[in-house]
Amino acid sequence: MGSQHTEAGTSDEANLPTNWGRWGEDDQRGTLNLITDEARARAAAEVRTGRAVSLALPIQPTPVISGPFAPATQAASPVQQLLQYTGCPPLATAEVLIVTNHHPRSTHLDALAHMPRAGRVYPGRPLDECVTVAGVRHGSTAAFSAGVATRGVLLDLAADGPLPSGYAVTSEDFDAAEERENVRLEAGDALVVRCGWAMTPDADRPMPGMTLDAVQWMHRRGVSLYAGDIGDAHPALDPACPAPLHGVALPLLGLPLIDAVETGELSAACAELGRYAFLLTVAPPRIDGLTGVPVNPLALF
Amino acid sequence: MGSQHTEAGTSDEANLPTNWGRWGEDDQRGTLNLITDEARARAAAEVRTGRAVSLALPIQPTPVISGPFAPATQAASPVQQLLQYTGCPPLATAEVLIVTNHHPRSTHLDALAHMPRAGRVYPGRPLDECVTVAGVRHGSTAAFSAGVATRGVLLDLAADGPLPSGYAVTSEDFDAAEERENVRLEAGDALVVRCGWAMTPDADRPMPGMTLDAVQWMHRRGVSLYAGDIGDAHPALDPACPAPLHGVALPLLGLPLIDAVETGELSAACAELGRYAFLLTVAPPRIDGLTGVPVNPLALF
Amino acid sequence: MGSQHTEAGTSDEANLPTNWGRWGEDDQRGTLNLITDEARARAAAEVRTGRAVSLALPIQPTPVISGPFAPATQAASPVQQLLQYTGCPPLATAEVLIVTNHHPRSTHLDALAHMPRAGRVYPGRPLDECVTVAGVRHGSTAAFSAGVATRGVLLDLAADGPLPSGYAVTSEDFDAAEERENVRLEAGDALVVRCGWAMTPDADRPMPGMTLDAVQWMHRRGVSLYAGDIGDAHPALDPACPAPLHGVALPLLGLPLIDAVETGELSAACAELGRYAFLLTVAPPRIDGLTGVPVNPLALF
Amino acid sequence: MGSQHTEAGTSDEANLPTNWGRWGEDDQRGTLNLITDEARARAAAEVRTGRAVSLALPIQPTPVISGPFAPATQAASPVQQLLQYTGCPPLATAEVLIVTNHHPRSTHLDALAHMPRAGRVYPGRPLDECVTVAGVRHGSTAAFSAGVATRGVLLDLAADGPLPSGYAVTSEDFDAAEERENVRLEAGDALVVRCGWAMTPDADRPMPGMTLDAVQWMHRRGVSLYAGDIGDAHPALDPACPAPLHGVALPLLGLPLIDAVETGELSAACAELGRYAFLLTVAPPRIDGLTGVPVNPLALF
């Protein structure tokens, strides 16, 4: 399924999985194309009680404050809030937000234009045509504009505790989790991965992450969307392929990534219910033309 | 169900429906309390094919541009985008957004603290305790943090075309729509209303809207959430009660409102499928402490 | 010169100095009216060598950063910088700034509308007429739009070291400084005060500040503009008059204030040259309609 | 004075004036180095009456407004204002500004890092070392941090009306203006140019601008700072050298540019006083690390 990426011509590039050209030269949906009616029906079948679990980290916005009481340091939140009374007495209260999209403490969805590879955006279009000063013309969040709903499968690699520091996740881990959980990820499903870590680089404690082998498993299986508490390791596991998710899966497979997913409550719910599949909805604010956007994915049981 | 609001002591206030005190003095969920396990199960039963329809207006962000080519006027979008290449050549592209939450061209969810009544936020707490310079302490978007999933019912008042200019929507319109659509809104359901209008004030063409009678119907029925293409009329239908939704339902009932909902595709889907109930998910970015937040509600069939 | 403020009718208010009505009901310049041709000529006479000294604190902007390297905490700077490459390779580099005007680590000019008194802006106009959601209609930075140039006089109260913690500055301190420096502040001059403190509240070390007596001295002498390293004490010296500068001088006298002035280099220059008067230019970005604005005052010798 | 730029090795590059290396490899002040004590004294001698004239365009900020009354289109102002009441009743009013630095309707100062040439910032340092995601490390507004004061000379090319559309300003125009005004620009002086145009591109009416010959005149004379109502022509006068000011003077000479200067009132004052030299102060907010910054230059007579 899908040819090997050969354009760059180096031996390294030649071994990378790719979907460039698979759905045409102008495709902007990437692996979302795998969500067929059959996949949707499989998702619907998982909804029984209506219980919903959020996969987003709560964000505490930082107030932008004037005056003598402004703090000297503050939390570097993904969101800043500028509160506004609309008069005195106020008819209403309101605010303006300043949102840093690709922030490690914000659960957010990466659009395909977020990560070019060798100056090109999936499926091979020149970066400067895709991302201009006036906006993103190709590979933006417009692909998620109407929302995504498909079956989600949690592969809980941290059922017995967080992965060891620096652990390299491979296809064997996924196979073992499927067997343990008695579930099988089908083409078009979203893959939710729990490693038991937060996406906070710590110089003293290397973060685990996905290997190229893990990404190749996703490619073989037809994963439509990746959502993980963590993703690429810090520091890189393999200098020759420093970021298998952001440097290969996103730009070559066209596989959208949700960074910084909260998986704790989901893991508990799956264990309690004894099932690891659910309907997953991913419906960020419908803002077209972005390279990324905060999102609150919901697992519905 | 629910007493009349008598605290203010005026005859006008005495006739207003209220939930102040119904779920305690510190309640922050308002009518979301009506979403019981039974309501959730009713919602789950509506999911059959996994088809998803977005109820959000697409937003085109406005780029913030420097240089000699900056335009003299621009669209007043709810979202401004500051694109950032992260170097040259860029490792990634990214952006910072400036988001105006309560914007008439943004589908957004109003938190309870958005609209005080007589200086008090639902269920009767002083505004200045609830909304401070440093953030919203009570009645914020924290109530929606984990997402909302319940049954949604579309009452399509524009099945035969947009409502007439200045039309006053009453309980009779809702009763008639239920009969026409062969559906009945139960306690805990979300009410989706389609009037066939956009939330754009036009001085020459008075916008229709909800009456106090319509809000009283919502109260009797146990609506958990209101989502409409429009809501309160402009100009007001009744100067004595200028904004039944934002001035009564939100602050007195604790009924969250979704403004500027896109109902066109939903209406077509309901007509095609011959059913007007669905699972509705409302999962805005999980940012606590706001007075409102953009959202992309999904109807799942 | 100038009557006592009697409008509010309380005994406290009755003793406060005021300029309400002195230059008409619609005046927006306040004590800047005192800068006559004579005052300007006096300022010009101080310019001999063209040496310029900045009275502004340097501001280090905080970058708004995405990606895995975003810090967990950051300096709460008055200015945030969103750097923008304009393509790849970039034709130019640029940025957008987010500026918090009334910030204790930013040398900034307070406009008259910044501080109402009893709901009224100098010279007695209702706040809600002056400051609306759509902008500041009266008492804004428009008064400084064309820049201010007048004679500045440094009264260096910290020539022998910082003032003691909690020190209450009175007219006697000003008189003593004038005698020590062999200078006399004339009507229309700007008063630059050095206390040897930074405008950083420290719970353990009460900040010195101006008394009402010091403000009355400014009123008698005809100070056109106040610029100090600090101004009002924290905590307040006198609970009955907690902020003589921001609560009396600004709203009642119409005396513009420059907060957080850097006076170290100025003090050294004055001591070296043996003179404490100079031409002071105050020319913030020409943005009308603000309640305050960052400024870089220059002393020219 | 200053060698020719030969590094790039092309015949075009070989004829361009340059100051790379003239004040060292790490220099960040460029032609501001020409402002000697002698130049400062010459400036001081021009101050006689203390009259001040602003050279900045007034900026009307655009309010960021929520609610049903948000406009559909708005002026694209360089400054957006987010007004904030600080409670109810408010102790103070304040705001946060969003400032687009390099905006054609904002009088602003370009720092040397704003315009690289062939990937290098004056005096030849690689762009990616100078401008990083975390801030500008070399060639930023830090060079103007303490303010600039020098003699300014207005060469009024529009004394008899605006220059013709598409007019190419050369050294002859400067020589003629000096003779007409009976003034001579000396090394270290700031050059203020009036063409009688606003910096607003108009597709139907080509804007005049400076030629490379005019820039060479500035180089020979030792201009320390350029301030013009307009600068580079739109469209370009010479495709082989499309932007003599922004593409040659700024990156090769290290000559700071003030864009979008208001010269009308200055022209009137000079004509009235019969002299075209004055003390010019340029003191933008003291924000280090920017590529540009709004400024309100003052001419003092």
Image: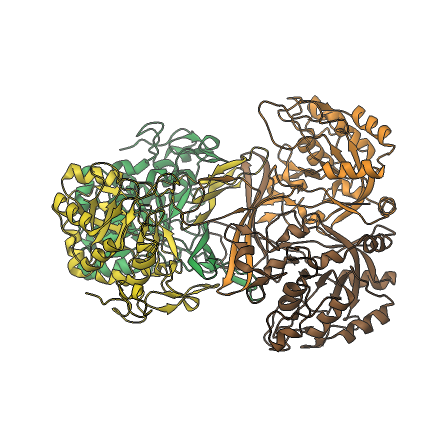
Chain colours: A orange, B brown, C yellow, D green
Q: Which image quadrant for residue A186?
A: top right
Question: In the rendered view of the protein, which quadrant contains the C terminus of chain B?
Answer: bottom right
Q: Is residue D260 left or right of residue A100?
A: left
Give how far across and how far down residue C137 sits, in percent: 40, 66
Classify the position of the N terminus of chain B by image quarter: bottom right
Image quadrant in which you'd find residue A123: top right
Image position, residue D30 (x, y; %): 32, 36
Specify the quadrant of the image occupied by residue B221. bottom right
Query: Can residue B69 be seen from the camera position used here?
Result: yes
Query: Could you say which is closer to the camera, residue A136 or residue A175?
Result: A175
How many numbered discs?
A: 0
| Residue A288 shows up from this direction | no
Residue C81 falls left or right of residue A5: left
Q: Establish if A190 lies above or below B28.
A: above
Residue drawn at point x = 66 percent, y = 57 percent: B109
Q: Where residue C19 sits in the image (x, y, percent)?
A: 26, 65
Camera-side residue of C162 and C189: C162
Q: Where residue D268 appears, x then y in whole percent? A: 25, 61
Task: Residue at 40% x, 60% y: name it.
Answer: C289
A220 horizontally vs D187: left or right = right
C4 and B11: which is toward the camera: B11
- Please name whichever residue, C168 or A37, is drawn nearer the observer in this view of the structure: C168
Residue at 64 percent of width and 77 percent of height = B237
Tell whether A187 sits left or right of C256: right
| C208 over B103 or under it: above or below | above
